[in-house]
C-alpha cells in the first residue's frame, strides 16, 4: 500500500511533529511505501484563484506541489496532521489543501476520480492549546472537505485539545499510542 503523510506543523519537535513520529512508527516500511511531506519545509505558493485549473485540471503554479500531486494520485491511504491555530488548520496545511483545487476540478468538473475504484481511507491528527471542541470541529471541517476532494471517502479523527507547550503531548496518557495504533489499523484495513 502507498501512504501519504502531511505534517503541517512549523515547529520541529513540537506536538504535531511528535505525533507524526509516532504515526510513522506504526507503519511497516517494508510492506508500505510512505511519502512524508513536511509542509513547512516546502516551497508551496498559495492558490491564486486564477481559474487556470478549471479547464485543464492542472495548476499553473510550478513549485513543490508538483511532488504532492503524483503522491496523492497514487496513495491508498492519506494522513493529515496539523496543529490547531485560531480554530483552524495551520497555514502550511491550508495552503497545501487550497492548492488541491486542480484535483477537485478533475473529480467534480471533469468526472475523473482521483484513484479509480480503490477505497481510500485517511487519518486526521489534530493538536492544539484550545480546550473547547470548536477548534477541532472547525479544523476538522476543512480537513473533511480536503479528504473528500482527493477521494478519501472515510477517515478517523484523533484530536488532542488543551495541549499547547512544545512537547506537552508527551505528558498525554494515551496520545502517542493512540496515533501509533490508528496508523497500524489504517494500513491493515
Image (cartoon, helix red, strand yellow):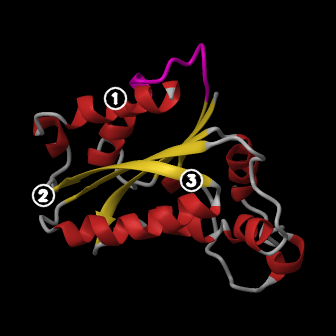
User: Dot 3 surroundings within 10 Å: few (below 14), some, or many (20 or more)?
Assistant: few
Q: Residue at x 33, y 28 (%)?
A: 181
* Label 1 – label 3 distance at C-alpha: 21 Å
Q: What stretch of residues is rendered in magenta?
A: 24-33
| Mark found first going from the N terminus, 3 or 2 | 3
The residue to which callout 1 is attached is 180
The residue lying at 63 percent from left, 42 percent from top is 119
Label 3 and label 2: CA atoms lie apart by 29 Å
Q: At which x and y percent is residue 69?
A: 73, 53
Image quarter where the N terminus lies is: top right
The one of 17 and 180 positioned closer to us in this rendering: 180
Of discs 1 and 2, which sits in the foreground? 1
Residue 122: x and y, percent? 50, 45
Q: Which residue is mark 2?
A: 162
Residue 32 lies in the magenta stretch:
yes
Task: Identify the element where label 3 is drawn.
Answer: strand
Residue lying furthest right in this view?
56
Could you say which disc has been placed on residue 153 in the image?
Answer: 3
Identify the residue at horizontal 73%, vertical 61% (top origin).
63
Give the mark nearest the N terminus, 1 or 2: 2
Taking the image as shown, residue 145 lies to the left or right of residue 71, namely left
Of marks 3 and 2, the one in the foreground: 3
What element does badge 2 sit on?
A: loop
Q: Farthest bottom residue? A: 50
Q: Does residue 110 sit above or below 31 in this rendering?
A: below
Compared across the picture, whether 71 is left or right of 30 comes to right
Closer-to-camera residue (141/16): 141
- Depth-wise, is mark 1 or mark 3 nearer the camera? 3
Question: Where in the figure is residue 22, as x and y percent of width and height?
Answer: 34, 30
Q: What crowding class fits label 1: few (fewer than 14 Cα within 10 Å), some (14-19), or many (20 or more)?
A: many
Amino acid at each position: 500500500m502507498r501512504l501519504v503523510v502531511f505534517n503541517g506543523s512549523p515547529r520541529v519537535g513540537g506536538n504535531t511533529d511528535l505525533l507524526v513520529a509516532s504515526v510513522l512508527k506504526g507503519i511497516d516500511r517494508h510492506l508500505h511505501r510512505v511519502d512524508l511531506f513536511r509542509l513547512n519545509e516546502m516551497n508551496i505558493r498559495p492558490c491564486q484563484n486564477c481559474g487556470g485549473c478549471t479547464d485543464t485540471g492542472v495548476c499553473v503554479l510550478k513549485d513543490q506541489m508538483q511532488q504532492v500531486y503524483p503522491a496523492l494520485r497514487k496513495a491508498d491511504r492519506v494522513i493529515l496532521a496539523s496543529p490547531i491555530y485560531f480554530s483552524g488548520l495551520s497555514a502550511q496545511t491550508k495552503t497545501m489543501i487550497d492548492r488541491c483545487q486542480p484535483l477537485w476540478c478533475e473529480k467534480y468538473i471533469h468526472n475523473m476520480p482521483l484513484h479509480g475504484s480503490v477505497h481510500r481511507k485517511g487519518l486526521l491528527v489534530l493538536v492544539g492549546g484550545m480546550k473547547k471542541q470548536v477548534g477541532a470541529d472547525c479544523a476538522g471541517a476543512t480537513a473533511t472537505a480536503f479528504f473528500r476532494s482527493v477521494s478519501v471517502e472515510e477517515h478517523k479523527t484523533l484530536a488532542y485539545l488543551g495541549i499547547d507547550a512544545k512537547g506537552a503531548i508527551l505528558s498525554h496518557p494515551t496520545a502517542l499510542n493512540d496515533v501509533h495504533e490508528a496508523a497500524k489499523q489504517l494500513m491493515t484495513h
